[in-house]
Image (cartoon, coloured by chain):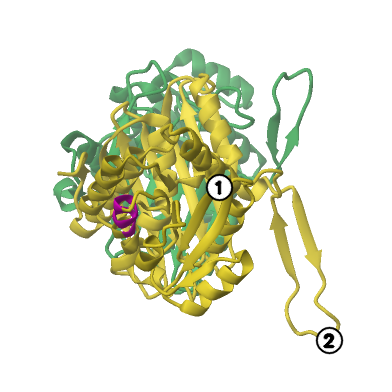
Amino acid sequence: MYGVGIIGCGGMGSGHAARFASFPDAQVVACADVVEERAQRLAAEHGARAYGDGRRLLADRRVDIAVICTPTPFHAPLIEAAAKRGKHIFSEKPLARTLAEARRAIAAAEEAGVRLMVGHVLRFFPEYALAKRLLDEGAVGRPAVARTARCSGHPQPPADWYGDYAMSGGVLVDMAIHDIDFLLWCFGPAERVYCKALTHRGPALTDYGLVTVRFRNRVIAHVEGSWAHTPGIFYTQLEIAGDRGLIEYDSDTAVPLRVWRKPKRGSRAPAVVVPESPLADSPYAAEVREFMDCVRTGRQPSVTPEDAYRALEVALAAEQSTLRGEVVALPLA
Amino acid sequence: MVKIGILSFAHTHASAYARCVKELPNARLVGIADSSQARGERMAAQFGTRLMARNELLAKADAVIVTAENARHARWVIPAAQAGCHVLCEKPIAADPADGRRMIAACEAAGVQLGIAFPCRFMPPMLRLKALCDDGALGKFLAATGANRGRMPGGWFTKPKLAGGGAVLDHSVHLVDLLRWMLKAEVVEVYAEVDRLMHDIASDDCGAVTVTFDNGVFATLDPSWSRPRCYPTWGDVMLQIVGTDGVAAANGFRQKFDLYDDRRGVGEWHYWGSDVNRAMIADFVDAVENDRPFGVTGDDGLRALEVAVAAYRSAALGRPVKMQEISA
């Protein structure tokens, strides 16, 4: 039986807790959050112990697996601390806020011989996984131009650390990194990055970034990340054009269920349309299953720590590019 | 009644424009002139008009539509202006900005209009987006994205000597023009990745162009010839504008239905939206008839071309390029 400790009991933390708890050989034994009531609430659901501090949770001997769902700057220090205590680690993306910290976290996990997987969940979304498979099968011929979009409203309070771009890195490091990882998975190493973004200079609670990535295999990719749309909106787009074909995907046109509910009698709330895309197997369940399989067998996860490092590197290169107004060559020194 | 001549059918849009002229009640197609005798005769027969020598046609026409290869626009436009004909010139204004400047000067000196054929400005979804921008519905402009993709057109479009460039020139000018028009701003800096990755041709066929405007707005443009032959339509024109009060995205050819006909082998999109070529030609004819300025000027054409030139310069230098480096 693997004891699972959840650090950071927000949306991702409580979701992952339920996913780990669904395995017959795993049990959530500890929950930590700086807001202790949040830790207590989640701990009560799982019959686990609550902590007000992640590092104290890591000292709990019953914890075999640390699941890190804190704000970004705490990922790497917690990974390092968990590795030193011999825990396997599943961390939300991004791996770290800086490359130096990312390196230290990876080294600590390697030294300790523990599994480390970063939640680049896009690879487990069936539409993206299928696009990658078709691409590998030669469906579009030689790939040439790729486009991705990931657009939503700005994260709202209480998750207000996202709006502190020194912490979150904004839409580039928090959102666009999903597509960046996917593109690196598809096309291999990036050669250079150019980016224009509102990050660090736009109006409050508005972020938007446009990244051009040139890959070593010459593919030109265009990445759009938006936290400038209306709250409640979320859509993604993917396009890969090659010399013989084209993959085109728009989540807005792939909606299998739409529900129009009338407002309750007497309510002044506007009627809303809720699009849903239900799946038998959630991509989040699939990524956690992959991680658990690695923990059990000792094999390397399909999303390697090095993959997470490369995705962070490109996202940080984009942030540097927009701040300096220059093309940024990779790898970053 | 405005007497229209068409100068060269080298560009594929010429036939569509000729049809529009034929359909307009206040315009008459008085003849065509062409560098290719065979093509000219074929087109004259098709549109029930006469192929004639350039100067004969210029003496008969009030206005001309120039649909030659990009590098040959000037050699048709300048004599037309000197003969006192108003001109509607196919985009891009020229293959080379110096040609564009000579054309503008010739038309100014002759006191005739030089309009540039940017039909995207006449798309009802784009007009609606422009109205939203003008009304301040999106608040202060922050950023934008545009895409104008198509099938690889072949022919002289892929020969840099005649076209002046490839996909990046052919398509980015539409998007730059739409953005200048909507944002009421000028491009100050350009960065571009340009390459030939999909087709066995002499010119570039894909790219990603980042432009920054003098009001701080940044935008990326996708001008690639990246639609495969089996794609259900020729291509698209899309523009999204992000403002402090909202985001709006227009798609110029989304008014379509999907046709599946076993005889055709592949599915096809059939556009049922408004005829934008007809709207543009009608507006040009009306401008000539009523002696008012046509909305898209030679200067608009030159600005868009200069941004494309900057994109090629940026790709060659591997760094962002200031527009002053180009216009100087």
| Badge 1 vs badge 2, beta-carbon distance below 8 Å | no
Residue nearest the viewer, comparing A107 with A30 = A30
Q: Residue at x 14, y 48 (%)?
A: B325
- Magenta segment boundaries in residue numbering: A78-84
The numbered mark 1 sits on a residue in which chain? Answer: A
Secondary-structure class at tag 1: loop
Indicate the colour of chain B: green
Q: Residue at x 53, y 61 (%)?
A: A29
The disc, 1 or 2, on the residue closer to the chain's N-terminal end is 1
Magenta-drawn stretch contains A302: no
Residue nearest the viewer, comparing A72 with B26 = A72
Q: Amino acid at mark 2?
A: Gly
The residue that label 2 is drawn on is A266
What label sits on residue B225 in the rendered view? none
Letter of the chain in yellow: A
Q: Amino acid at mark 1?
A: Met
The residue that label 1 is drawn on is A1
Quarter of the picture containing the C terminus of chain A is: top left
